[in-house]
Amino acid sequence: MQRLILLAGLLALSFGAVQIPVYRLIQYEYEGTHLGSQVSSINYLGAHYENTQEIPRKITMIHISNLSIESLETLLGHKPSAVLIILTQSHPQGLKELESYLGTNSFPFPIYFTYETPEVMDIYNYLQQQKGDQGSDIDQLQFSLSTDEKPAAKGLAQENYYGFVYEYSEALPTIALVTYYDAFSIVPELSQGMDANGSGVITILELTKYFRKLFSTSPPAYNLLLVLTSTGTLNFQGLRNWLDSEDAELQQIIGNIKFALCLDTLGKGSDLTFHVSRFPSKENEADIAKLYADFNKTSSITGTALNYMKKKINMADSFIPWQHENFAKKKVLSATLSHLPAASTSFIDRSSLYDNKENIDIDAIERNIRFIAESLTRFLYSRDDGNLVVYNKAELTSKESIGFWVEKLGNYTRFTTKLAPGAEFPKLLKETLNELTNSTFKVQKYPVTDYTLYNTKGENLSVYKVKPAILDLYIFLGIFGYIIVLWGVIKAFGKPFVSKGEAKRKTK
């Protein structure tokens, strides 16, 4: 028996496992349709996407540089049991179409993403070298991830925050600065949303700090309202809930808004675009017409390109491309300021796997903060001269202050399921707003109803070498042969030895 154990031990090989951080494709339901990756667990041998004979019933690795709609459809046609996509640190071409495809289809198997590292590329290259059928003499790679299937986030709630830069007066008209603080990606754990819409959050925080000081020394003839909502990436459900609130006090505040300036994607580019559904009437809305004129004046003085894009609201379309359209439906004059020249066509368009702190332009955010602050100051304090009022003031904002918030936001995943009441980022945001305004912001809690999202978390995928399954057969046959031979020896020579032993005992 000891010989058998020794033989099995010599034949068996053990390899250490490599742990790879992986992030699963989104899983959600919309209008009764299940979309995204529907399965979490993995326990398959690995295959390279070029080795098409090996793809069925295995997890297939493919690099983002080799991925297109065509190559993805070809890969899926070979019926893999799972897919692992390797991401680079730099933004690849054609990613927007891939994100849309992955985010709007249903996949009955796991799809995971991981970042390119030396360990990951060693595994990828090893699989690539295994051309054709993997024979009995080739070590194979086993991929294992044992995890519970993630439940739907039932009863998911979110919070909107609103308050004033300075004391509110019902006798004064209100200018509202509006933005959303959540982020979206087809890979929830990678949802930093630094441009969309971390830049909007940073801009409104920096403007709050500046206008609080200005209003404290010289209050203008307007209230300045701040509104930060969640689920902006999910068809602006948070803002719609805020506007539709039945709270009498809130409705009074909303009814007092003369103009709502919505801030969205201000972290890149050199141009800005005002997206509007209608322009103010020079006869009945002359004051807001002057606000537009002040933005144009600032554009002329600073050399910042400011464009206008007028888009009629499609009341029959359930998708809402811009924040300001929610105000427009309530007959509130409004606009969205963004570096994007055109509207999104679906909520998946707002996804970007590379919208992170490494790909944000701090200079652009600073320029846009200064541009907005200058334009609003000219309007609020009726400055009509051709000189800059505050644009070049050092105390207005700084790259260091913006960089601080970029780093801060980069520490959080702002996907909707991570922003439930009491979560770290909403708590930080609320505390910051209270501190900057020396007041207590109002909180509006509401349920997420338009979409059913599933909980997610980052996982570690174990990868280790294994011998081909046929080797088990060879080991079995070897051991079986050894036992047969041993049995034959005992059968042939064991009886005489036993007889001699018995004879000796009798002689004694």
Image (cartoon, grey):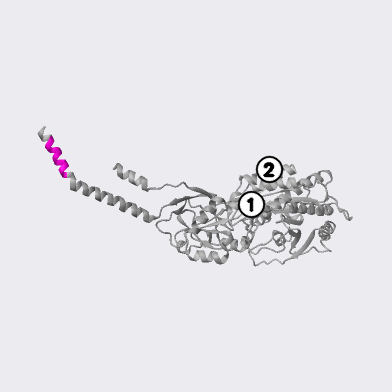
Amino acid type of disc 2? Glu
The secondary structure type at the circle numbered 2 is helix
Residue 379 point in image, percent of width and height: 83, 54
Which quadrant would residue 97 be assigned to in this image? bottom right
Residue 498 among magenta residues: yes
Q: Which mark is residue 192?
A: 1
Q: CA distance from mark 1 to mark 2?
A: 20 Å
Q: Quadrant of the C terminus?
A: top left
Residue at x 76% of width, y 61% of height: 274
Q: Which residue is mark 2?
A: 431
Outermost residue toward the top in this view: 508
Outermost residue toward the left in this view: 507
Residue situated in front as seen by the camera: 439 or 487? 487
Residue at x 64% of width, y 59% of height: 350
The secondary structure type at the circle numbered 1 is loop
Mark 1 touching mark 2, by CB under 8 A?
A: no
Q: Which residues are magenta?
A: 495-504
Amino acid type of disc 1? Gln
**Could one spot residue 106 in this view of the protein?**
yes
Judge from the rendering whether residue 229 lies leftward or rightward of residue 483; answer left or right.
right
Judge from the rendering whether residue 475 lies leftward or rightward of residue 126; answer left or right.
left
Residue situated in front as seen by the camera: 461 or 413? 461
Label 1 Cα neighbours within 10 Å, binned few <14 / some 14-19 / many ≥20: many
Residue 14 point in image, percent of width and height: 42, 47
